[in-house]
Amino acid sequence: MSKKKILIFDDDKTILDIATIIFEENGYEVGISETSHDIIDKVSEFQPDVILMDNWIPNIGGVEATKLLKNHEEFKKIPVIYITANNDINALAESAQADDYIAKPFNLDDLEEKVAKYLKD
């Protein structure tokens, strides 16, 4: 069986490093990106099963990047979990058409549970 793939968009290197370690230890394949303007290319190349999307990410931002993905016929079914420290996370996730969200700072167990929920076969 092939590994489930998680693609993480975040400009915070610490979060990328920690999330990569955690998810790889759990047997996932992890892809990371510090920018989101080329989201379609990245998703096309990596073919993730789930995407973690930061709100404050360089170039076009999480909302626009998620919308691009959700309006793309081939990739719109990939679950996107929105991650931000913004107080209005629910509204942001909704406007981005994200499937779910988690607030920063997040508990790693909560993040793992959210991801697992979308990776059930």
Image (spheres, rainbow, N blue to C red):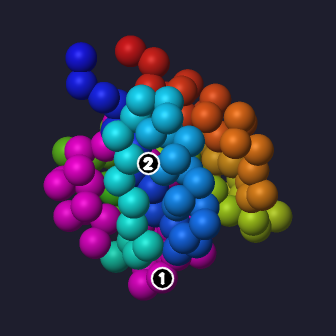
**120 and 72: which is toward the camera:** 120
The kind of residue on which mark 2 rests is Ile
Q: What residue is at 49 percent from the left and 35 percent from the top?
A: 25
> Total number of numbered labels?
2
Residue at x 23%, y 45% (from the top left corner): 47
| 59 falls in the magenta region | yes
Q: Viewer-proximal residue, 73 or 27? A: 27
Does the magenta-highlighted stretch encompass residue 40? yes
In which quadrant is the N terminus drawn?
Answer: top left
Any part of residue 23 in sight: yes
Q: Residues within 10 Å of mark 2 (few under 14, many from 20)?
A: many
Mark 2 or 1 closer to N-term? Answer: 2
Task: Check the image and report above or below for 91 versus 86.
Answer: above
Quadrant in the picture for the C terminus: top left
Outermost residue on the right side: it is 87
Image location (x, y in percent) of residue 113: 64, 29
Query: Which residue is found at the position 48% from the left and 82% from the top?
Result: 58
Magenta stretch in the rendered image: 38-66
| Image coords of residue 38 (percent x, y) | 28, 72
CA–CA distance between discs 2 and 1? 17 Å
Question: Which residue is tagged 1?
Answer: 58
Q: Is residue 108 above or below residue 121?
A: below
Q: Relative to 12, is 103 above or below?
A: above
| Quarter of the rendering containing residue 109 | top right
Query: Label 1 is placed on what type of residue?
Result: Pro
Q: Are marks 2 and 1 in contact (CB under 8 Å)?
A: no
Which residue carries the number 2 mark? 51
